[in-house]
Image (cartoon, rainbow, N blue to C red):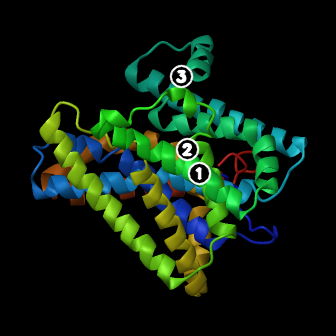
């Protein structure tokens, strides 16, 4: 996720991107909390279907973050000093916030404290589940000098061509092959395609700069979003009938079913941003959107801290969906509050 968002003219933030940041940050928390509940249920109950729909909606978080980054990172061809500053900042985030998680594990779980092992851990793996995205984003920043030059040389036709290959073909073929092995093709054919996750950067830039705002497109986006979500829920129930021990085949953010939902959500947010003129609302959105990266960095920490409260209190007094919403809201709001405090500290605010 590009943290310091501003518009193409560099003078103000693109407000609908801040709204998307808030939604995606909350969805990251949902993604890490909802699956444990429906996986423990017998598929077929109404709450199971609702939780599965909620879970799959949350899978749009990473694609949306990547599309936001595409809007903000691909609009200019930056100098290598700026690229280096971005890379250094994310490396600092990985080291400093991973160390926070490491110290907590040492204190809570009684594990041995070893700085050498800590650096081996963050070099080879990750200290907490959510931080896989930081390594993905670091790779994007390393490739960004090339990606920016590619984006600057592409026209509308080239963007569409790239989307068809990397988002459409690579996102659709695994689903077709899953159901019909006859669709299996030689992997060498697509081995040089730009990966779906990288192509999502270009998709975000394309949707912002090459797609007009029209009510017809908005209607299609709603239909795609609803249609994909219904398909995912129904197909996942069907997967349970086939392989009950492992039925989350569609839990893959590069599948076309997820990326199409994310693109639709992105476009609808852009449409909403063009018609909503309530300044107080956008002022609040801009402030909270500015806390979204910090919320992400701290989400697994507060997820763990609030877990006993959720399991021992909320689940016993509320419906599971209500309990989840309260749990996720606590994580989100606590993360926002702590981030707001950290952003008041001069040496720290650039990191969150």
Q: Quadrant of residue 97?
A: top right
Q: Is residue 293 visible?
A: no
Horizontal arrangement in the rendering, residue 289 relative to residue 219 (left or right): right
Helix, strand or loop at disc 2? Answer: helix
Horizontal arrangement in the rendering, residue 130 relative to residue 248 (left or right): right
Neighbourhood count class around disc 3 (C-alpha, 10 Å): few under 14, some 14–19, many 20 upward: few
Residue 223 in the image, given as x and y percentages of width and height: 37, 71
Neighbourhood count class around disc 1 (C-alpha, 10 Å): few under 14, some 14–19, many 20 upward: many
Q: Quadrant of residue 194?
A: top right
State the mark number for residue 125: 3
Residue in the picture at 18% in, 47% down: 237
Residue in the picture at 15% in, 56% down: 47
Give the CA distance from mark 2 to mark 1. Answer: 6 Å
Residue 154 in the image, given as x and y percentages of width and height: 76, 56
Give the CA distance from mark 2 to mark 3. Answer: 22 Å
Residue in the picture at 31% in, 37% down: 178
**Nearer to us in this view, 113 or 193:** 193
Neighbourhood count class around disc 2 (C-alpha, 10 Å): few under 14, some 14–19, many 20 upward: many
State the mark number for residue 196: 2
Instruction: Note whether 46 is above or below 242 in the view shown.
Output: below
**Nearer to us in this view, 258 or 46:** 258
User: Could you tell me if the residues under marks 2 and 1 are in contact, i.e. CB atoms within 8 Å?
Assistant: yes
- The residue labelled by disc 1 is 200
Residue 141 in the image, given as x and y percentages of width and height: 72, 40
Front: mark 2 or 3: 2
Residue in the picture at 18% in, 55% down: 49
Give the CA distance from mark 3 to mark 1. Answer: 24 Å
Earlier sequence position, callout 2 versus callout 3: 3
């Amino acid at each position: 996720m590009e943290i310091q968002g501003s518009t193409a003219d560099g003078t103000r933030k693109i407000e609908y991107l801040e709204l998307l940041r808030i939604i995606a940050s909350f969805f990251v928390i949902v993604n890490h909390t909802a699956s444990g509940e429906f996986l423990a249920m017998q598929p077929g109950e109404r709450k199971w279907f609702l939780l599965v729909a909620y879970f799959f909606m949350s899978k749009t978080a990473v694609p949306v973050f990547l599309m936001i980054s595409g809007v903000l990172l691909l609009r200019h061809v930056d100098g290598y000093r700026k690229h280096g500053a971005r890379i250094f900042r994310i490396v600092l985030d990985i080291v400093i916030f991973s160390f926070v998680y490491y110290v907590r594990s040492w204190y809570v779980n009684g594990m041995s404290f070893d700085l050498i092992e800590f650096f081996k851990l963050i070099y080879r793996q990750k200290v907490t589940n959510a931080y896989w995205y930081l390594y993905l984003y670091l790779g994007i920043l390393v490739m960004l000098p090339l990606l920016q030059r590619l984006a600057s040389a592409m026209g509308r036709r080239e963007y569409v061509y790239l989307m068809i290959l990397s988002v459409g073909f690579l996102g659709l073929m695994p689903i077709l092959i899953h159901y019909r092995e006859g669709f299996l093709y030689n992997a060498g054919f697509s081995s040089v395609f730009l990966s779906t996750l990288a192509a999502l950067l270009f998709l975000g830039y394309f949707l912002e700069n090459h797609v007009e705002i029209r009510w017809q497109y908005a209607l299609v986006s709603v239909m795609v979003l609803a249609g994909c979500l219904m398909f995912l829920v129904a197909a996942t129930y069907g997967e349970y009938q086939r392989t009950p021990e492992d039925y989350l085949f569609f839990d893959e953010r590069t599948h076309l079913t997820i990326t199409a939902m994310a693109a639709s959500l992105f476009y609808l947010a852009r449409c909403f941003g063009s018609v909503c003129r309530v300044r107080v609302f956008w002022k609040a959105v801009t402030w909270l959107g500015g806390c979204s990266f910090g919320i992400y960095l701290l989400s697994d920490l507060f997820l763990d801290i609030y877990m006993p409260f959720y399991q021992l209190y909320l689940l016993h007094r509320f419906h599971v969906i209500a309990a989840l919403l309260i749990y996720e809201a606590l994580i989100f709001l606590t993360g926002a509050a702590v981030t707001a405090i950290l952003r008041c500290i001069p040496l720290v605010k650039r990191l969150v």
